[in-house]
Image (cartoon, rainbow, N blue to C red):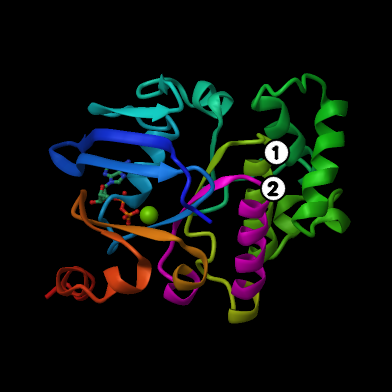
Amino acid sequence: EGAGEALLRVIGLSKSFRGLKALSNVSLEVRQGEILGLLGPNGSGKSTFINVVSGHFLPDAGEVWLGGRDLAGLPAHDIARAGIARTYQIPRPFPQLSVLDNVAIAAMYAGRGISTLDGGRHAAHEWLEFTHLADKAHQLPGDLNLHQRKFLELARALAARPQLVLLDEVLCGLTPTEIQSAVTQIRRIRDQGTTIVFVEHVMDAVMALTDRVVVFDQGTVLAEGAPREVMQRPEVMTAYLGV
Ligand code: ADP
Ligand code: MG
């Protein structure tokens, strides 16, 4: 598993914020069908990578190839339609819409032939079933606990029927039992054919889930390889400990 050809190929991606190089000439590949762990200390550029690849920020330079198409610089909705979905480190539902309609809107936004709210709701029921939120369909996001809000984020991302989903710290703040449930859920997402980039600090989950990891440090790729081997490299331990 996880040994497919490249689905996403990022070449020379750079992004600065007022002189601060959040991403500096980052190149990496995500293989079809894998769960790629994206690791690195706080501030190393992981969320910026997700924001740029998903079109939420414009890159300063670089290419983002999905299949035969360079998506770099396209607006977020075009990138979503091309097949890349993402979650936010802090869940961002529409607070005034029901759980069901939050997912329905996501299904419509992706433009996969769903153009009516009824069609969106129909698809949304399926994704709420998949994420164990079916009994919360008619509640508001504010009625959900953190674990359920994170699963709502997953349902919204999946409703776009992406080829690739970028998960930004979906386990953050969850209890050990909830983490186990989320790890199982993420494996199910991959098993139904979606490729995953998994940004996470919870190392047990990284070890359990990922086929391969890439470690960022100060906006550059510091290391890449099998999770257990990479985490033992001295330069990676140094980056994490900050010594
Ligand atoms: P990570 O997700 O690895 O913790 P980020 O990508 O969030 O790191 O941040 C990388 C660097 O870019 C940090 O120094 C952060 O302060 C900066 N940064 C991220 N987003 C913005 C932004 N919208 N405006 C200004 N600086 C930002
Ligand atoms: Mg982050």
Cβ atoms at labels 1 and 2 below 8 Å apart: yes
Q: Specify whether 243 is left or right of 89.
A: left
Q: Which residues are magenta?
A: 179-205
Q: Secondary structure at mark 1?
A: helix
**Near-viewer residue (236 or 135):** 236
Q: Specify whether 103 is left or right of 175.
A: right
Q: Callout 2 environment at 10 Å: few (<14), some (14 to 19), or many (20+)?
A: many
Residue at 45% x, 34% y is 54
Q: Callout 1 environment at 10 Å: few (<14), some (14 to 19), or many (20+)?
A: many
In the image, residue 126 above or below residue 231: above
Query: Which residue is labeled 2 in the image?
Result: 155
Residue at 42% x, 29% y is 55
Residue 231 in the image: state x and y as whole percent.
29, 72
Image mark for residue 195: none
In the image, residue 40 above or below residue 88: below
Residue 97 in the image: state x and y as whole percent.
75, 40
Q: How many marks?
A: 2
In the image, residue 234 above or below residue 156: below
Residue 187 in the image: state x and y as whole percent.
62, 61
Q: Specify whether 92 is left or right of 241.
A: right
Q: Residue furthest bottom?
A: 176
Q: Label 1 to label 2, Cα distance in Å? A: 6 Å
**Near-viewer residue (121 or 8):** 8
Query: Which residue is labeled 1 in the image?
Result: 159
* Residue 146, image quadrant: bottom right
